[in-house]
Amino acid sequence: MSLEPVETSDARPRVGRRVAIIAGVSALVAAGLLGMLVTVSSGDNRFAVDLAWAELMVSLRTPFGEWFAYLMNAVGGGVIGVFIVPIGAAIVLLVVRRPWGALYFIVASAASAGAVQVLKHFFARARPEDMIVVSDFGSFPSGHVANAATIAVVVGVIVPRTWVWVLGAVYTLLMAFSRTYLGAHWLTDTLGGALAGAGVALLLWAALAVPLERERVAWRGRGRAALT
């Protein structure tokens, strides 16, 4: 997926946003549909994959594994995940003169968190019984995974490199694994979180595509000039 600039007569980039809009809307719709399915399949009718995965995670628990999962829990949520990470990232982007990137990071983080809370209270899914970490109300979708997916997309947009997208995907998968490892979420909760977080980030990408692309091109030009 790319938003390629096209020079127009007034020298402003025209950015293709259709793919981002379609992908973002599709991801949010898929998250909503999945939420409906897991609500219907509550109680004794839970998804077999959720039950099997939860049993596997309990069987794999070790002191080191729990330490890693608790670390991901702290990084992906609470004060660190909700405030320190987005604000810190925005400050860095402002320092390197990418204010639109900073705005995108902050707005996407806040919008993703808001969307997750709406879905949590709408579906009100119970968390697994083997949870070993304190969490808020509602199991679907995973806020930690939504936050990870949002960051992955936002950073991928700001620094459009293949390795950045790969690292973002790995980070999101590790976050999903850690949430189920701690018993804080069902496997389908993490999928819903990834869809919600990515969907919000993609739609905001489309909304801010022109200034983001203009800023990226200018920033790249300054970097090349510094090397000459």
Image (cartoon, helix red, strand yellow):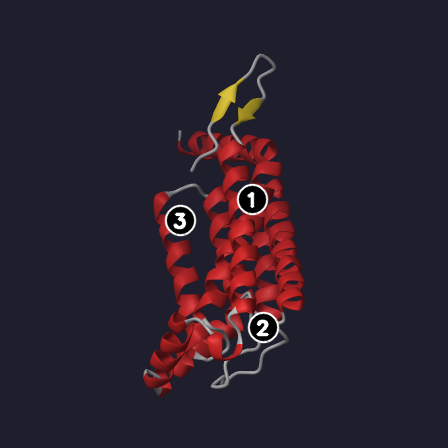
Whole-percent x, y for residue 73 in the image: 50, 74
Q: Are marks 1 and 2 in contact (CB under 8 Å)?
A: no
Q: Residue at x 50, y 85 (%)?
A: 129
Quadrant in which the N terminus is drawn: top left
Q: Are marks 3 and 1 in contact (CB under 8 Å)?
A: no
Q: Which residue is mark 2?
A: 125
Q: Residue at x 49, y 35 (%)?
A: 19
Quadrant in which the C terminus is drawn: top left
Whole-percent x, y for residue 41 in the image: 51, 70
Q: Is residue 193 above or below residue 228?
A: below
The numbered disc on residue 165 is 3
* Residue type, numbered disc 1: Val
Residue 19 lies left or right of residue 228; in this view the side is right
Tag 1 or tag 3, which sits nearer the N-term? Answer: 1
Q: Secondary structure at mark 1?
A: helix
The numbered disc on residue 25 is 1
- Which callout, 3 or 1, points to the residue nearer the camera? 1
Q: Residue at x 63, y 71 (%)?
A: 124
Whole-Å distance between the Cαs marked 3 and 1? Answer: 20 Å
* Residue type, numbered disc 2: Arg
Q: Are marks 2 and 3 in contact (CB under 8 Å)?
A: no
Q: Is residue 101 visible?
A: yes
Residue 8 lies left or right of residue 182; in this view the side is right
* Residue type, numbered disc 3: Trp
